Image (cartoon, rainbow, N blue to C red):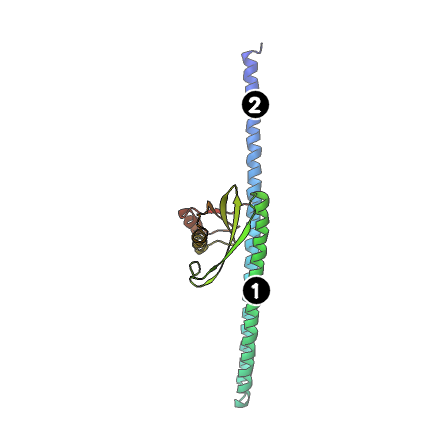
Amino acid sequence: MIGLEEILKRLDRNEKRIIELREDMLRGFERYDEELTRLREDMKEGFRRHDEELTKLREDMIAGFERYDEILEKHGKEILKLREDMKEGFEYLNRHISALGARWGLMAEEAFREGLRGLLEKELNLKVESWVRNDEEGVVFGYPSVVEIDLSISDDKVTLVEISSHVRPSDVLLFLRKARFFERLEGRKPDRLLMVTPYAEKEAFRTAKKYGIEIYTKV
């Protein structure tokens, strides 16, 4: 028979192993959180650099226009018409550059959303599909528009998913209006409202909690 002292020794060894296992798990969780934090910081830094580049481009264009104005102002009435024509041309160019920037932003956002769709399917086993309807009464945006919602149906439960690179309180309320629009047209209330983003403002979390919306910043 095993003596009491031997039993106590074995219990002590098991307790040490459990403590070591817990410490290993905690270190693993810390590394996981650190990696997600670095990813979030890298994405925020990328967005910040993009904004800085656009700001610098705008400043350079403004400085260029100012230099042209100084040169043209030195000439008389004969050049006034030429300056007006050039101004119209610059405005036309600026509109095209702005449109190009907006288009690039939409493409980048869509690429980001597609990437997160893949992560949702892989990590959370959520098969995401698009639900698109015409909102003729302007329920969602306040004017007639096309409303697109990402949804997942699993075990007869409907989950509405909103994927975005940045979630503000206004985005939460917009998602809520989309969910109510879905319920109105489909005749059933979604079982779950889920927002997935690498960055959400603190007020967005409070707003989401108020309306029973889940925000995931870790996938």
User: Is residue 150 in view?
Assistant: yes
Residue wearing tag 1 = 103
**Residue 65 occupies which quadrant of the picture?**
bottom right
Q: Residue 210's spot in the image, x, y percent?
A: 40, 47
Label 1, residues with CA under 10 Å away: few <14, some 14-19, many ≥20: few
Label 2, residues with CA under 10 Å away: few <14, some 14-19, many ≥20: few
Which structural element holds mark 2?
Answer: helix
**Residue 18 occupies which quadrant of the picture?**
top right
> Residue placed at 55% from the left, 35% from the top?
26
Give the vertical position of 104 relative to 113 (above or below). Answer: below
Which one is in front, 130 or 30? 130
Tell me the number on the disc at residue 112: none
Residue wearing tag 2 = 14
Q: Residue 52's spot in the image, x, y percent?
A: 55, 62
> Residue placed at 56% from the left, 25% from the top?
16
In the rendered view of the protein, which quadrant contains the C terminus?
A: top right
Q: Amino acid at mark 1?
A: Arg
Give the vertical position of 116 relative to 20 (above or below). Answer: below
Q: Amino acid at mark 2?
A: Asn
Q: Tell me, yes or no, whether the two marked residues, 1 and 2, touch with CB atoms within 8 Å.
A: no
User: Is residue 64 in view?
Assistant: no
> Residue placed at 55% from the left, 20% from the top?
11
Q: Residue 121's spot in the image, x, y percent?
A: 58, 46
Foreground label between 1 and 2 = 1
